[in-house]
Image: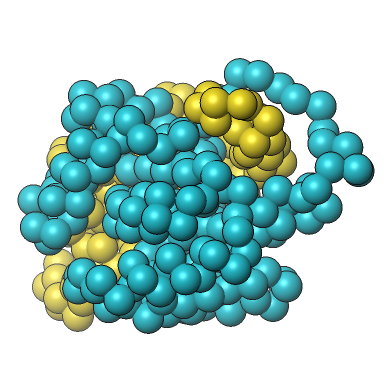
């Protein structure tokens, strides 16, 4: 977010309500912009009302270490960048059973796609995609990334919400069919 | 001699996106305007090529390669200007962080959210994406014009505001019977 406009404001959740369990899925936890934003978000959200867990598709990375030092559970799928791995999907499905999250929040294309399938298989209550780019030149990325972006457009009617962090990002992705 | 000015630019590992080609314009600007000193924070596979380019342009003494920094905030505070030469962006953290440090931003008007954050002449300046020469020329002008600016992070980008939006969204999602909002 950092661009999302949520029109309907709600009063803070009461003390008697159960905390909302949120699993954040992201490709890696190195020092990129999305990773930094995830870290800021998770460490600033109220811990009484929200219970976060972070899953990296690859390894823990420096942001993962920082989150862990703040008491946030951080798990790794051990996938390799640029290598689709069915094992990663199975591992994520198993991981999602235990915390039984209320929301699966995914961050950027690859995590959006993996999280969508794992979330559906694991019957996660709500799936929220996160888009943090705008008109990126897909030709500068791997064919796998371009394929993932295209697949996401086809599946984009299924998540419960799609977040963008800029108005331009929203416009570009709407044009692409999201 | 006029007071030395300090420009600062952060380039990450995504070299194509961060458009290191503009280093030559940075270097040319530093060579022709002796008040300028360019500090590059960040790293990537193009670093050595960039160093050679800086040497070839005779601007090595006015360009510092700071490498990857765990905490770039002191650089942001120290700089008179942050230069963002990305070719596309989402909502760039570096631009937001520079503004939060009170440092104006000179950026390419690239596809993405940069233009949604910057207000020409208020908290920064935009140059047409790909206009390397224009970016180099604008540096001196931007630094000279900086004194008239009161730089602050736009309210809607403050982490407290952003976090509150996410919290509202998650609460609404859970409480909405259909899920969709």
Q: Residue furthest top?
A: A7
Answer whether residue B42 is visible to the viewer in this image: no
Q: Quadrant of residue B150?
A: top right
A178 or A131: nearer the viewer: A178
Answer whether residue A119 is visible to the viewer in this image: yes
> In the figure, is residue B42 to the left or right of B22?
right
Q: What residue is at 83 percent from the left and 52 percent from the top?
A: A48
Q: What residue is at 73 percent from the left and 73 percent from the top?
A: A71
Coloring scheme of the render? Answer: by chain
> In the figure, is residue B115 to the left or right of A83?
right
> In the figure, is residue B90 to the left or right of B177?
left
B102 or A1: nearer the viewer: A1
The x, y position of residue A124, in whole percent, is 51, 50
Chain identifier, colour cyan: A
A90 or A9: nearer the viewer: A90
Q: What residue is at 13 percent from the left and 51 percent from the top?
A: A147
Chain identifier, colour yellow: B
The x, y position of residue A176, in whole percent, is 19, 30
Q: Residue furthest right?
A: A15
Q: What residue is at 71 percent from the left and 57 percent from the top?
A: A51
Compared to residue A23, the image places residue A153 above or below, namely: above
The x, y position of residue B114, in whole percent, is 38, 35
A135 or A58: nearer the viewer: A58
Quarter of the image that includes the N terminus of chain B: bottom left
The x, y position of residue A112, in whole percent, is 36, 50
């Amino acid at each position: 977010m950092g661009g999302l406009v949520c029109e309907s404001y709600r009063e803070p959740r009461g003390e008697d309500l159960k905390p909302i369990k949120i699993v954040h899925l992201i490709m890696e936890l190195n020092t990129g912009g999305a990773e930094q934003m995830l870290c800021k978000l998770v460490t600033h959200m109220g811990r009484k009302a929200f219970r976060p867990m972070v899953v990296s598709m690859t390894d823990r990375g420096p942001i993962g270490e920082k989150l862990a030092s703040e008491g946030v559970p951080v798990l790794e799928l051990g996938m390799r960048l640029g290598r689709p791995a069915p094992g990663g999907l199975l591992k994520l499905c198993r991981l999602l059973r235990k915390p039984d999250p209320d929301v699966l929040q995914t961050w950027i294309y690859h995590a959006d796609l993996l999280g969508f399938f794992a979330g559906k298989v694991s019957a996660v209550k709500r799936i929220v995609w996160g888009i943090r780019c705008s008109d990126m030149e897909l030709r500068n990325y791997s064919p796998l990334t371009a394929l993932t972006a295209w697949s996401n457009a086809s599946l984009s009617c299924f998540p419960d919400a799609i977040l963008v962090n800029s108005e331009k990002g929203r416009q570009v992705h709407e044009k692409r069919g999201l | 001699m006029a007071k030395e000015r300090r420009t600062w630019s952060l380039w990450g590992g995504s070299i194509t996106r961060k458009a290191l080609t503009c280093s030559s314009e940075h270097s040319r600007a530093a060579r022709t305007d002796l008040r300028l000193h360019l500090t590059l924070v960040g790293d990537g596979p193009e670093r050595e090529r960039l160093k050679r380019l800086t040497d070839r342009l005779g601007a090595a003494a006015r360009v510092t390669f700071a490498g990857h920094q765990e905490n770039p905030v002191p650089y942001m505070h120290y700089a008179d200007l942050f230069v963002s030469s990305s070719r596309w962006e989402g909502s760039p953290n570096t631009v937001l962080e520079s503004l939060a440090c009170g440092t104006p931003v000179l950026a390419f008007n690239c596809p993405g959210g940069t233009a949604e954050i910057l207000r020409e002449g208020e908290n920064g300046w935009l140059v047409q994406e790909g206009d390397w020469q224009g970016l180099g020329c604008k540096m001196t002008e931007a630094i000279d014009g900086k004194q008239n600016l009161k730089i602050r992070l736009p309210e809607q980008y403050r982490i407290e505001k952003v976090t509150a939006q996410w919290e509202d969204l998650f609460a609404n999602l859970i409480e909405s019977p259909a899920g969709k909002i």
